[in-house]
Amino acid sequence: MVECVCINSKNRPKEIPVNKWVKEGEPYTVIFTVTVLPQKQLAFHLAEIELDESCHPYEYFLANRFAFTEENLLKLIELIKDCNDTDFSMDELLKQTEVEKV
């Protein structure tokens, strides 16, 4: 988890209600990072705000809405690496998700 501050709350999509929108100057906690398409931009899942199916197609907040201290920026880099680590075996995944045949 990485602490940040919202620096851009402009242009709220109409699909996201005001109570689920970030507020400029407020602190937030990044708990997961993704690259969103088609923008190919870094985006965050925040601990404080759950963008659920009512906010569709929006699931994450773009990273350019937030600022970080130098220390937290280093933590963010580690979180991004952790979230993008896909070092797993497809064979192992298939074994773990196999449906038992009756």
Image (cartoon, rainbow, N blue to C red):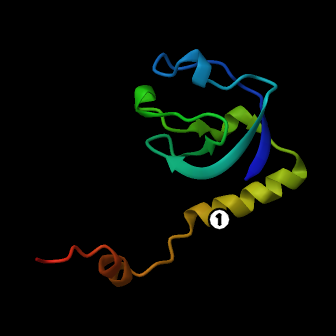
Mark 1 closeness class: few <14, some 14–19, many ≥20 residues within 10 Å:
few
Q: Which residue does the image show at 79% across and 45% down from the upper left?
A: 3
Residue 56, quarter of the rendered image: top left
Question: Which residue is most to the front?
Answer: 102
Q: Which residue is at a point 56% across and 35% down the rendered structure image?
A: 50
Task: State left or right for residue 13 relative to residue 91.
Answer: right
Image coordinates of residue 5 in percent, x first then y, are 80, 35
Q: Which residue is tagged 1?
A: 81
Left or right side of 80 for 38: left
Q: Up-down: is 32 above or below 39?
A: below
* Above or below, comparing residue 98 to residue 82 in the picture: below
User: Which quadrant is home to the C terminus?
Assistant: bottom left
Residue 29 relative to residue 71: left or right:
left
Q: For the point 46% across and 78% down, which residue is it?
A: 88
Q: Residue furthest left?
A: 102
- In terms of depth relative to the viewer, which is nearer, 40 or 24? 24
Residue type at tag 1 = Lys
Horizontal and vertical percent position of residue 11: 59, 18
Apparent side of residue 75 relative to residue 89 in the rendered image (left or right):
right
Image label count:
1
SS of the residue under disc 1? helix
**In the picture shown, does residue 102 fall above or below 57?**
below
* Quadrant of res 20: top right
Q: Position of residue 32 (x, y in %)?
A: 61, 52
Report x, y in % for residue 86. 50, 71
